[in-house]
Image (cartoon, rainbow, N blue to C red):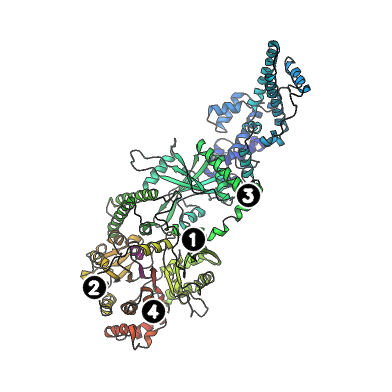
Amino acid sequence: MFPSWVANDQLTLAAVLTRIAMEDTRCRSPQTIGDQLRSTGLALPEVPGPVVTRDLVMPVLRTVRRGGAPWERWWDVDGLHALLIELWAGRRLSRHSREEVRDELTAVWCFEDDWLVDTLLDNVEDPFAFLPPDLLQQSATGTARACAELLITRGLMKITLPGDSLSTRPGLADRPDLLEVAKRCHHRFHLEETMQRVRGLSPDLLTRLGRDLDAWDARMSQVTSHLTAYELGLITPMTEDERYGEECLRAGLGLRAELDSDDALLWHSDSVTGDSSVPDWMTEEVITCGTRFFHRQEGPHPVWLATLETDAHMAAVRMLMQPPTRYGFELEDYGDGLRLWFHFPVLPADPDPPFRAPYTYSLSWVEHAWELLHLATVGYARLSIVRLVGDGELRAVGSVRLGLPEEVRARAKEAAIAALRRLVGDETQTMRQRIALEGHDQAAEVAFQICEIAKGEDIHDELALESGAAEYETFMTASRHLAWVRARQSAGLLDGKNPLGEDAELKAAAEARQRTLEVLRAATGRGNGKARWSDHSDKPSVGEQTAFVHLINRYGTLQLAVCRTRAGHSHFDLATCEEFPLVPLAGAVDEWARQAPDHSRRVWHDYLEQLVAECGGPAQAIIETVTPREVRRLVLSPTAPLELLPLHAAPLDSARTSTLIDAFDQVVYAPTARLVSAIERSQRQAAVVEVLVVAHGGGHLPGLEPIGGPLCEAHVIAGLHNSVEVVTQEEATPARALFMMPMARIVHVAAHGLTHPNRWAAGLALHGGSLGEAMLTSSGILADGVFSSVDLVILNACRTGTHEGTGRTVQTLRSIESAFLARGAKAVISTLWDITDLQGVVFSAVLHAHLGAGADSHSAYANTIRYLREHRWRVPSEAGPVCAAESAIDAMLPDWRHHLGQQAEENPLFWAAFKITGVV
């Protein structure tokens, strides 16, 4: 693989290997590095590029990521390469002319800076051959030596180095040659300083002494000019902070160096294609943890990640990656830490503020303080950039090396060292142990809070970010406009149209919303260490008898992050379910979702029963983490693939007679505790009518088969309440429904429910001249919905609580129910799969019978589920709300009990399709 002049020379070979590692710090891809080695002759050009990449470049990169550069300054990859090149140049100059070596430095080693090349050409193989004699022993005229002898005899000058010499130059302990240089320099300057204090010296003596010192300096300058930069650093005294900082860095060798796989880091954008995948750990941080900007230490690399969300962000990145790059940094103190704001280039004629990325280092954590020290010492960050596209998908953009300004490095280093002195002190050897142990008591809270961030994105922010700031109104206006544009585009998609220019309008609207959100966050303090939005919005609002459980897909393993309130304080628990792998479950759920419910041989139903049985493991883990006798209300926030399954129906025993819903008084769903708090705090308006029923049986458009259930439901519900407004068929248009919904306390919609790959086009099919006109979509609800008077929305249609999305996003609500919650509804009842007309009618009748009798939303829901699950319809009720419901059904469907019994035999879990989400 190597030519003989490389393979047979250890120094040259070592320089080649460090060259590979050095190019990696500049974010050049392994393929680019390998091609460069072949084109410059450092590797044989006849060896195929993929072979050089696989067998040479990647092994070096993995080794360096794992253990750093192979010398005592493991973090200084560039420094080791520079040292080896200086040594190589010095030896080469002893055998070849300066012009030959100059050509090799530019053509082979690719040095383009003339000043740097001249510096390298000043090296010689043995700089110590020029070392002047010790002035205590010899000098040009003998004057300096005689003066030194006299001063030593009189006790005015010492021949030994000061006691702190090695402590301020610790690298000299292993370099006797440099120690001798330092000793002779000390004698020379100590002699001059002492002689300056002696009075009455003759001019002739001073002249001869000056000649000796000048002659000595001339020879010593030859030595120092031929020393390497590393050697000059060793003989230069270090401050106490510099010494302590290097001691801390050495103690952290190997910290967080687990990403040694080939695809663990991104490289420069010239090696990234449009469909390049993102490393799993970055996807995990962005998707599972909800992070947009974060820092991480990977071997010698300080890695920063930035997530792009708009075209304006992408344009700024393109400018960043085009030389000469122009960017800025800003340092900000916050609470107990330091935040570095990276400013992307400003687009020409762009009136908006520059795109900024925050990187926060808490100085209360040893790991963060150490990472900040490392960043300030190496002086660069490897900025990896990914783009969030579609339904939670990530695309690689590339990486770029960011050099930190000297003033930023100095302040960051000072802050990091001060923090480490406070946190670790002189026991630097315990640093890795401290980092391994710190934060264990906060792990559960951290896991819970990152779920709050990850699952609180997009439309849920619009309610949870409620603020009195003027910027909030601007943000909401932009959000409504984006929803309106999405609604119009959704109508076009549903009608098979894709008008020109709509994509550009949609991108502009999304850009405007993102910009106003950034301004709102800056104005209200989010992102700079202050309270977000209000004094209590960051703290989960969980009742004393409530447990909020985030289910987390962490690298394919299920974790539970639980929040409870005890004595007025939030308490967190974290449990890992190692025995419950989510990867095979995700494949099974995907296979099940592709099957039709009426598939022959009960395939769909068998799948469902198996999947729900698999959920028994997580259910049992929840029971073990959350003691039912102490908790009455369980709030679940699942993530993919669990958000498509009825966790409330998960069995707790092998006979499946006891389920999760039996263990608590309430089992409800919600994306975040923050959204629940926002709904609870929202100002409620008085309703004009108790119940609004919107029903449409379809049949008026191709693809919408006529169904009788919705009109039957409307008739039954009208007879179970005293104050009911019913809108059906031709009157039940999306516009009329949205106009009337804010007047009601309970909204019931019965119609065809349709999912769509574009989640903004999913919704309920009402009346209209085309499918686009007839659909009450998620985007339409976000554009025009106002539900501050609505306590409960019942979406009694197929698949209103599920979605077709394939993105690896943790957002749990991607269906139409989320839009109702974001626009102020307290709770939504929806369905996880297709339901029959009869199931919809019976569920609605029993539910509204309980609601009409004064039951609250959850009691009515729980009683209805119990009725269906226990097959209570088989024996007619003689009194109470259920009797009224059954009588109403009897009047319209005399044989309903028989048919429902058949459907229950075919799918015993039919009742589990109904779930309730929000605040009840």
Residues 502 and 101: in front is 502
Amino acid type, residue under disc 2 in the picture:
Glu
Amino acid type, residue under disc 4 in the picture:
Asn
Q: CA distance from mark 3 to mark 4?
A: 57 Å
Q: Is residue 767 above or below residue 176?
A: below
Residue at numbered disc 3? 431
Label 4 SS: helix
* 113 relative to 810 in the view: left or right: right
Amino acid type, residue under disc 1 in the picture:
Phe
Mark 2 residue crowding within 10 angstroms, few (<14) / some (14–19) / many (20+) = some
Residue at numbered disc 1? 448
Residue at numbered disc 2? 725
- In the image, the segment drawn in magenta is 812-830
For the point 56% across and 38% down, the residue is: 38
In primary-sequence order, the first of circles 2 and 3 is 3
Q: CA distance from mark 2 to mark 4?
A: 24 Å
Label 2 SS: strand
Residue at numbered disc 4? 863
- Contact, CB < 8 Å: mark 1 with mark 3? no
